[in-house]
Amino acid sequence: MHHELKELAEAWQARPVEERLGMSRRGFMQFCATLATTLGLPATAAAQMQTAIEQKRRPSVIWLHFQECTGCTESMLRAEHPTIEKLILDIISLDYHETLCAAAGHQVEAARRQAMADNKGKYILVIEGAIPTKEDGIYCKVGGQTAIEMTRECAADAAAVIAIGSCASWGGMPSTGPNPTGATGVAEVLGKPVVTIPGCPPNPYNFLATVVHFLSFGSLPEVDHLGRPKFAYSRLIHENCERRAHFDAGRFAMEFGDEGHRKGYCLYKLGCKGPETYANCPTIMFGDAGAGTWPVGCGHPCIGCTEQGVGFQKPIHMLAKVKNVEPPASYPSVGEPQGKGASLGSAAVLTAVAAAAAGAGAMFAKNLGKSHAEQQAAKDKDGKQDNKAAGRE
Amino acid sequence: MSAHVHAAPAPVGGRLLNAVSFVCAVLILSAFAILALRFWGGLGAVTNLNDGYPWGIWVVGDVVIGSAFACGGFSVAMLVYIFNKGEYHPLVRPALLASLFGYSLAGAGVIFDLGRYWNFWHILWPGYASPNSVMFEVAACISLYILVMWLEFSPTFFEKFGWTNAQRKVGRAMFFLVGLGTVLPMMHQSSLGSMLIVFGTQLHPLWQTMALPAIYLISAITIGYAVVLFESCVAAAGYRRSIEMHLLTPLSKVMLGMLGLYLAIRFGDLIVRGAIATAFEPTLQAFMFWLESIAFVLPFWILGSPAKRANPANLFVGGAVLMIAGILLRVNSYLIGYQTGDGWSYFPSIPEMMVTFGMFAIEVLAYIVITRRFPVLPREDHAPAGQAA
């Protein structure tokens, strides 16, 4: 039975990728190009991704859930370009996922251990949810194992560990004070940095692009000091926000439903955390819900869900610390002076000087002419006298 | 230079303090006071400059017109050394003196006009400089020319102080300095016109033309001769010397020749481009164009015949009118023919004008001091020197 299933699966894998994914060849290539763009990679990278995805061998993925709401998985399931469940089932071999597994109980735990043994050192471990650490982590158990034990066991032989969502990244919402369970992130439990895809939930494409990067290039994308891929988390939301022009011009919504709010003014004064939150929401939106649908686009201030110390910690109405440029206390005048015409005084001075110069010049020329005429007359007289003298001789 | 025997230059002598130098000193002091205010409170404190008219009379008056008036040295040196007309040699030193101060003050005037004057050295500094820009060409040429001119004029000081060794050394390099002193002004006087080409359609078609470099260069050379006529007449009258009519009369003929060439290019260009039609529209620009053109044509009527050229009054008036024409051409093309958009206007403020008057006063005072104390003007034995100024 098990053998037959394996053959069936291999036959399924042998089919061309576009058939497996239920999409046209053209659509598949577009998908690869889109992912390459999300990662900020050149067009040649799309071809590499294409080759990687077309391979028959799918990498094994083990997906663990701890203290969370399954929002990250939900968001993933709602992705439609292409439908992510196809992708997640066909590009990767999702060997363990508590929400999506048909099996249950000891059977599914056995399947996880089997997959880990078969793909030792090659599988990708994805962790969703915070890990409680108080009282030896008794607040979250799966199959009799605490979250801490499970994390350490699965991470030991994983090729890469990815923490998805804010909870797995640093503790997220469950870690909000007073944090009764001692909820914390994956990196802290493992004692080493992991790739984090924070967000509540994060955009599925940020996760997917990270996985495909790993498949294509055998390495994880470049990350910042918090383990966040730089392609998605290197810019403040404020930098690319569609309402930024209103911020710069000093036009703010002062309360929900007021005139400025209805007109789409900047939400900074309603507590928008865009100026201190790093994420690519303004460029790729939130989830896969269509154009303009992300919190700020819909009129709600950003809560800073991707930023440790901001999301779930600062009250939503609290003013953000503007990390790039503080708004100035006053703005330079845009009505610049266009110059004064001639004043009575300046025109008079110029005229007077010109007249004085002209008068002096005229007098000077007159005197020169007069002395010239005198000289000419004298010369003529001399000439006549000379002539007379010559005549006498 | 062809062999000519001339009286050696000698100091005119006489008192330095008189009515003229006193008035000059007052103008200079008030200009300095205004400049102190300008450097304390910025350009807006004393000028009417604005973003639409960033160049006012400090640039147009002190630099563009000032340097054109200072072309006497270059025009006469070209005549004497390049065209080998040695007979004009006595005119070289006084003309060079006027040029020296005209250019040095033009260089200083640029710094007054720069909003961030402390960055003035950027334009000549490798890494900051942009060698493809016309402005760079002007800045580099004028700075170099000022240096060259001081060297060209340095024998006057060496003679005075008896530094024969230095005089001999400079004398050996003089052919090279004179060559540079001819090429450099040709380059930047034409570039002062090229700068306007960059203004594009902001400049009225009566002045916007690819011939602007030629128009600026030839008018500058012509004005150089006009300034020599003007200055020789005024200096002779002021110092009670005889006017060098034997030099000025033929020089005025050279001037008319250059003026003819200028008018041919100016009007030829206007007709070829068809821009002459705009001169018949009822606009301020058309009116100013005709004023400028009349001033350029008048010298032919004033100095047209040999008899008229023999009269020093005509030489003086002809030179003065041509200088006015040069002023009009430059003011018209830089300010009156320049329209940067609706609403912008510019007219110099009184302090702004006072600075420009102060700059010209420096030139006059320096001319008086140097000609009275240093060997610039040719020695004149029969005339009593320095009765008045």
Image: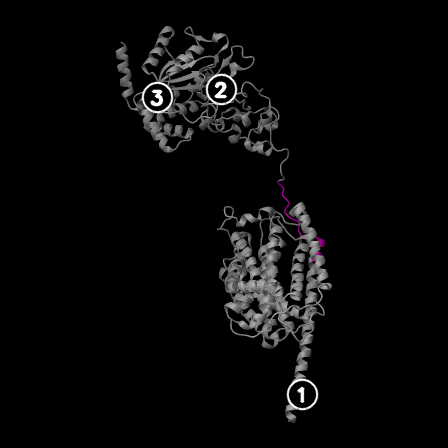
Check if residue A346 falls in the magenta segment: yes
A197 or B260, nearer to the observer? A197
User: In the shown orientation, is residue A105 left or right of residue B54?
Assistant: left
* Chain of the residue under the numbered disc 1 shown in the image: A
Secondary structure beneath dot 1 equals helix
Kindly identify which residue carries mark 2: A200
The chain under label 2 reads A
Residue B290 visible in rendering: no
The residue indicated by pointer 1 is: A385
Which residue is more in the foreground, B211 or A361? A361
Q: Mark yes or no: residue B122 visible.
A: yes
Residue B139 inside the magenta-drawn segment: no
> Label 3, on which residue?
A91
Q: Main secondary structure of the magenta part?
A: loop
Q: Nearer the viewer, mark 3 or mark 1?
A: 1
Residue under mark 3: which chain is it in? Answer: A
Give residue A143's position: percent from left, percent from top: 41, 7
Q: How many marks?
A: 3
Magenta stretch: give its range.
Answer: A334-349
Side of A108 relative to B362 (left or right): left
B36 vs B251: above or below? above
Q: Secondary structure at mark 2?
A: loop
Q: Amino acid at mark 3?
A: Ile
- Mark 3 element type: loop
Cα–Cα gap, marks 3 and 1 = 125 Å
Tell me where residue B152 sits by quadrant.
Answer: bottom right
Callouts 2 and 3 in the same chain: yes
